[in-house]
Image: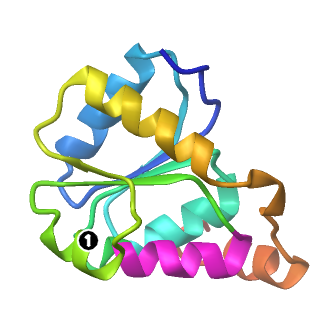
């Protein structure tokens, strides 16, 4: 088992699956900071919470998980992340180096994916500029 992670953002378009993934992560000793269903909400939550890990579905409603991760990285820098999806073809095609997990998954598989994601990214590069922080704090999803 990996060390407990104190801040995980879960983004899944299915309003039942996202909380389920959050519960699984909680049972593994991790802390979920937010569960969202849209691309914009994922970006806002990432900037607001500065998670240590993001678990991202490739399809969001509305939006796209890969685009959300691109926006998040552009705003706050590299963040360890895992793409979880029932269909990983698009993720593997667009982001061949991505850490992926196909739904449905076993507990051991998510633990391994978390371990791989945490080993891959240098989190010392995560940043939030004052301008980005101000724009996020006034975003309609936050207020």
In front: 121, or 128?
Answer: 121
Q: Position of residue 109 (x, y in %)?
A: 28, 30
The answer to whether 131 appears left or right of 77 in the picture is right
Q: Which is more toward the observer, 94 or 25? A: 94
Residue in view at x 26 percent, y 71 percent = 91
Chief SS of the magenta region: helix
Residue 94: image quadrant is bottom left
Q: Residue furthest right?
A: 130
Instruction: Identify the image quadrant of the C terminus.
Output: bottom right
Q: How many marks?
A: 1
Q: Magenta residues, as a range? A: 66-77
At mark 1, the secondary structure is helix
Is residue 11 among the parts visible in the rendering? yes
Q: Position of residue 79 (x, y in %)?
A: 62, 58
The residue at which mark 1 appears reads as 91
Q: Is residue 104 magenta?
A: no
Residue 14, image x, y percentages? 17, 54
Residue that appears at 83% across and 54% down: 124
In the image, taking residue 131 as reference, residue 98 lies left or right, namely left
- Left or right of 50? Residue 113 is left
- The coloring applied to the image is rainbow
Location of residue 140 with respect to 100 vertically, above or below: below
């Amino acid at each position: 088992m990996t060390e407990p992670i104190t801040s995980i953002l879960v983004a899944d378009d299915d309003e039942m699956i996202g909380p389920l993934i959050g519960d699984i992560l909680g049972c593994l000793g991790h802390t979920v900071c937010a569960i969202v269903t849209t691309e914009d909400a994922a970006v806002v939550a990432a900037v607001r919470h500065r998670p240590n890990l993001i678990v991202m579905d490739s399809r969001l409603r509305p939006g796209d998980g890969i685009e959300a991760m691109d926006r998040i990285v552009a705003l706050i820098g590299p963040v360890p992340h895992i793409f979880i999806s029932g269909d990983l073809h698009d993720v593997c095609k667009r982001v061949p180096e991505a850490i992926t997990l196909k739904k449905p998954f076993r507990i051991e598989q998510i633990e391994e994916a978390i371990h791989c994601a945490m080993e891959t990214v240098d989190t010392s590069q995560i940043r939030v500029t004052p301008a980005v922080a101000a724009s996020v704090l006034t975003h309609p999803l936050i207020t």
